Structure formats: C-alpha cells, structure tokens
Image: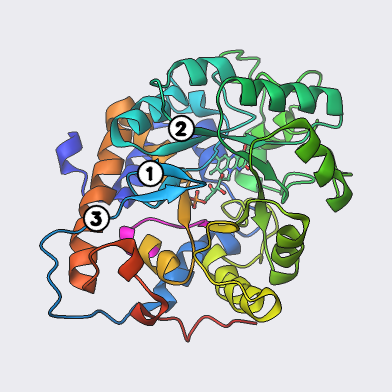
C-alpha cells in the first residue's frame, strides 16, 4: 500500500511480513522460546491507564527533550537492531538518513550489516549517534571498536549486558543461516562460525560470556563517552550501575529475544524508580543517571507512560526496522511522523504542554507491581 495509507507503527509490521523473505522475517520477528516475554512487552503497557488533566491551555505543545544531554525531537531513539540489510539494500543507513531529517538519535549496532563507517558517513554534520557494543572476548578488538566510535564522534556507548549468549529463537533457528551473503552479514567477528542454527547464533559467537562488573572501570579508562548498560532487569542491578557511576541504564529484555519470562521494561521501571528513591534518594527523570526503557513500544501513549513513570526516553527496535523493509528511508520518516503526530495529539488530550507536565500522577500504574 502507498505510504499515506499507513496509519500506525503496527501497520509496518504486517507489511514487512509480506515483503520480507522467510529468513529475514524469522530473524527480525523472532523471540526466545515460547515468545511470552515478547508478547508481554507490549501487553504490559495495556495495564497502565491515564489520568488526564483538563482546562489547561494546550494550544502549543512540545515533546522535544534531551537524551544524555543531546537534543532529540522526541523522547524516542532508534534502538540497535542487527542485520539491517536483510530488510533493505541500504540497511541501517535508512535509519541514519531518516533520523537526520527528524532530529532523532540512532544507536548503531555492533552487528550492523553496513559497516560502522558507512553509517557514520551517512549522518549529517552534527547528527547525534550512539553505539551499541557487544563485548568481544578479544578486548583489543573491543578497545579498537570503542575508540574508533569515539573518534568518529559517537556520543554514548551502550554496552549490551543481557546477552552473554544469544537466546533460543526457534523461528530463526528453523531457517538455517546458510547465507554466505557478504552484503548482509555483519562485519565484526563472525568468521568461522556455526551457521546451522539461525542468523542470531551464527553472528554472535564472539561475545564474551565472562563480562562482569569489575570490567566496567576498564571501559571507563578507554573512553570518555558516557557508558550506559543495556539490558538491566531489576533494581539491584540498576542500583549497582548507579553506584559504579555509569551514566544510565536501559531497562530492557532485548525485545523478548533473550530470557523468556523476563519482565517488560516498563514493569522494571516502576520498581527501579521506587527503589533508587528509597536507597539513594534519587528522583526521576534524572540527568545524572538516566533511565531508558525499550521493548514493545508501538504508540506515543506507550512512550508517555514511560516518561510519566520516570524514564528519560524510550528505545524502539522492530517498528523502525519494519518501516524500511518496504519503503526504505521514506518508511522510517513516516514512522517518525506518525509518532510526532501521536505525541502532539496525546499531549493535548493529557493536558500536558511539555514532557515536564507528564508526571507520575498522570498515570495509574497500580496494576504494575513495584516488587
Ligand atoms: N540489541 C542489541 O543490544 N544488539 C543487537 O544487535 C540487537 N539486535 C536486534 C535485532 C533485531 C532483529 C531485534 C528485533 C532486536 C535487536 N536488539 C538488539 C534489541 C533491540 O535493541 C531492542 O532492545 C528491542 O528490539 C526493543 O524491542 P522492540 O523490538 O519491541 O521495540
């Protein structure tokens, strides 16, 4: 269908399913085991309801914000998703170019199908990009990647901590990853691997299973970029992250692709905010220690719930990936435009002029336990 018939982010998913090869659809859409967490990620938002305010002048509303100190047109960033060329020949560069037009920040994945430099080169001067790091067993490789990212102007290092091994994604495993298709496969560290168990397994064997808290000072010593841990899943680890002095955490279960029955990011957010207040007197959103959430975000209302509960911003994975499968860069631009329009409307209906007005009292999260 023509792009102007696309009304929401869900629409991109059904179109992607139609246009993608079986293999690409399996890799993008799959999640761990019985995919219960993947389903719960979105469903969890259905348990949170709004308490809108009335009779406030909402003629002008503004949903722009700052993420790690950088301007963002909305409280949403493009989360890292590997193997963009399975969906479109321009792969991740579709995201880069659309993000430039819309003032959105892109997180570049370690396992992109475009090279890191291609993605950075596709950016406009001044465009902000982050880098998602899978830590290689070979720390010299890791150090080189990180320092190269910093030298190319990347503004934040998101270390993925929920993937000491990749989850069991059975849809993907059924599609044996035979492709010696060099245009698609990620460049880093994927040589000589077992391709019989799906794309995910094939590309991930270099990941360091021994990564631990004690390694974080080393990361701080090799880069000045702010460090963010991606994949924190309980308040105890969020507290430890705060205490070791990282700039933030992403409360995430990796789009349901890792441990099945991991809780949704929004559920984790509620307990993290409560416990960090209790233990360290922190209030959120907090510039010094930023909380991000991802998984299952499909509507601006989902985002606004996370903002109300203390998140600085929210990551979106599959919908942006799906948006370029059929339409390339224009599809991603349309996805941003849809969110933009949803923010405008929903802020007005909430009685909030800016994100600062989106306070905890604007949601009823009593159906989400705080542990
Ligand atoms: N997260 C990473 O940290 N590194 C990756 O390489 C990575 N690749 C992904 C590939 C695909 C196809 C998908 C769907 C997710 C991937 N993720 C990866 C997880 C996303 O960054 C994000 O946590 C997740 O997609 C959010 O859930 P959503 O897809 O429901 O928005």
Residue 366, above or below 48: below
Sequence order check, earlier mark of 3 and 1: 3
Mark 1 beta carbon near ligand 1 (under 8 Å): no
- Percent position of residue 264, x then y: 57, 65
The alpha-carbon separation of the residues under discs 2 and 1 comes to 9 Å
In what element is the residue under mark 3? loop
Disc 2 + disc 1, Cβ < 8 Å: yes
The answer to whether residue 1 shows anywhere in this view is no
The residue most toward the bottom is: 366
Q: In which quarter of the image is the N terminus?
A: top left
Residue 335 image-quadrant placement = top left
- The reply to whether residue 349 is visible in this rendering is yes
Question: Which quarter holds ligand 1?
Answer: top right
Depth check, front residue: 341 or 182: 341
Residue at horizontal 70%, vertical 28%?
146
Instruction: Identify the residue position indicated by label 2 in the image.
Output: 128
Where residue 62 is drawn, which disc sits there? Answer: 3
| Image: magenta residue range | 293-302
Whether 359 is drawn above or below 35: the answer is below
């Amino acid at each position: 269908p023509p792009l102007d018939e696309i009304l929401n982010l869900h629409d991109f998913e059904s179109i992607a399913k139609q246009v993608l090869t079986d293999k690409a659809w399996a890799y993008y859409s799959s999640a761990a085991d019985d995919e219960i967490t993947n389903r719960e990620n979105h469903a969890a938002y259905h348990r949170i309801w709004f308490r809108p305010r009335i009779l406030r002048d909402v003629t002008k509303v503004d949903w722009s914000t700052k993420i790690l100190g950088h301007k963002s047109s909305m409280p949403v960033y493009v989360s890292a998703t590997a193997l963009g060329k399975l969906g479109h020949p321009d792969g991740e560069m579709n995201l880069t170019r659309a993000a430039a037009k819309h003032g959105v920040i892109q997180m570049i994945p370690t396992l992109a199908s475009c090279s890191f430099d291609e993605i950075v080169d596709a950016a406009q001067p001044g465009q902000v990009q982050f880098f998602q790091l899978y830590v290689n067993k070979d720390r010299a490789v890791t150090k080189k990647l990180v320092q190269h990212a910093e030298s190319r102007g990347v503004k934040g290092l998101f270390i993925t901590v929920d993937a000491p091994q990749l989850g069991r994604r059975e849809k993907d495993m059924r599609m044996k990853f035979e492709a010696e298709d060099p245009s698609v496969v990620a460049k880093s560290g994927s040589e000589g691997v077992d391709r019989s168990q799906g794309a995910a397994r094939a590309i991930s064997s270099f990941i360091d299973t021994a990564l631990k808290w004690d390694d974080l000072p080393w990361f701080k010593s090799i880069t000045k970029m702010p460090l963010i841990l991606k994949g924190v899943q309980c308040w105890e680890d969020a507290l430890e992250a705060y205490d070791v002095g990282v700039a933030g955490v992403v409360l995430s279960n990796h789009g349901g692709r890792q441990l099945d029955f991991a809780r949704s990011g929004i559920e984790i957010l509620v307990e993290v905010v409560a416990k960090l207040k209790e233990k360290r007197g922190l209030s959120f959103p907090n510039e010094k220690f930023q909380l991000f959430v991802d998984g299952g975000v499909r509507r601006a209302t989902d985002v606004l719930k996370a903002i109300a509960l203390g998140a600085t911003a929210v990551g979106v994975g599959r919908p942006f990936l799906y948006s370029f499968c059929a339409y390339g860069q224009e599809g991603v631009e349309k996805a941003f435009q849809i969110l933009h329009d949803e923010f405008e409307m929903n802020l007005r209906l909430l009685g909030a002029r800016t994100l600062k007005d989106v306070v905890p009292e604007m949601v009823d999260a009593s159906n989400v336990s705080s542990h």
